[in-house]
Image: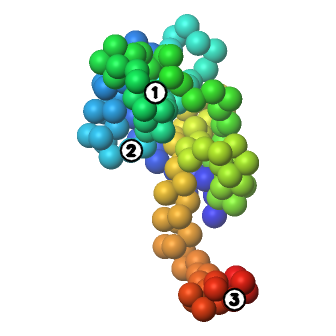
């Protein structure tokens, strides 16, 4: 299965001058964990995630004063719609993030989340043997 089959083509976008509270409220309304930040002065899109907002607020930053542009996820990895879901999942695990911005021909095509990958795999009938409590206790996982 490919990224194009699992990604959301409807992407929440937000500007860099919005506050963290604005971003959190928009994510809550759309029930998403990330927003793509489009800044005409930046070389490409950025991403603000619920984790970025949590880190800022947990560090004492004021969500009504702090701007999205100051809390973007750095070192973005962009995915191609032609990638396999396995490749996308591996990139997420390697990078320690849960969202990939999908770009096709230099254009924003969508966002793929870890939740999207799990949904695709479970709808596709993927199964796994889950060890029982006794197997875990015996160290045979």
**Residue 62, percent across and down?**
35, 19
How dense is the environment of label 2, judged by Cα within 10 Å: few (below 14), some, or many (20 and up)? Answer: some
Between circles 3 and 2, the one closer to the viewer is 3
The disc, 3 or 1, on the residue closer to the chain's N-terminal end is 1
Q: Is residue 84 visible?
A: no
Q: Which mark is residue 10?
A: none
Measuring from the top left, give residue 124's x and y in whole percent.
Answer: 54, 74
Residue 32 is labelled as 2
Q: Is residue 117 above or below residue 18?
A: below
Q: Which residue is mark 3?
A: 138
Secondary structure state at the residue bearing disc 2: loop
**SS of the residue at dot 3?**
loop
Q: In the figure, residue 80 lies in which quadrant?
A: top right
What is the x, y in percent for residue 34? 45, 38
Q: What mark, if any, has residue 59 been given in the picture?
A: 1
Q: Residue at x 55, y 44 (%)?
A: 99
- Residue found at the far top of this picture: 41
Name the image quarter holding the N terminus.
bottom right
Residue 137: quadrant of the picture: bottom right
Q: Against 135, is 45 above or below?
A: above
Instruction: Identify which residue is drawn at 34% across, 13% down.
Output: 65
Alpha carbon of mark 3 to alpha carbon of mark 2: how far? 39 Å
C-alpha gap between disc 1 and disc 2:
23 Å
Classify 10 Å Cα crowding around label 3: few (below 14), some (14-19), many (20 and above): few
Disc 1 or disc 2, which is closer to the eye? 1
Residues packed near mark 1 inside 10 Å, few (<14), some (14 to 19) or many (20 plus): few
At a point 50% along the width and 22% down the height, the residue shown is 71
The residues bearing labels 3 and 1 have C-alpha atoms spaced at a distance of: 41 Å
């Amino acid at each position: 299965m490919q990224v194009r089959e699992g990604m959301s083509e409807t992407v929440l976008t937000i500007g860099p001058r919005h506050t963290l509270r604005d971003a959190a409220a928009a994510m809550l309304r759309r029930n998403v964990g990330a927003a793509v930040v489009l800044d005409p002065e930046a070389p490409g899109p950025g991403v603000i995630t619920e984790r970025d907002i949590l880190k800022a607020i947990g560090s004492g930053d004021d969500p009504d004063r702090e701007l999205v542009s100051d809390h973007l996820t750095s070192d973005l990895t962009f995915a191609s719609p032609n990638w396999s879901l396995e490749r996308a999942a591996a990139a997420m695990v390697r990078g320690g993030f849960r969202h990939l911005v999908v770009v096709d021909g230099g254009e924003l095509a969508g966002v793929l989340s870890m939740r999207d990958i799990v949904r695709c795999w479970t709808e596709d009938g993927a199964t796994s043997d889950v060890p029982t409590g006794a197997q875990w206790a015996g160290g045979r996982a």
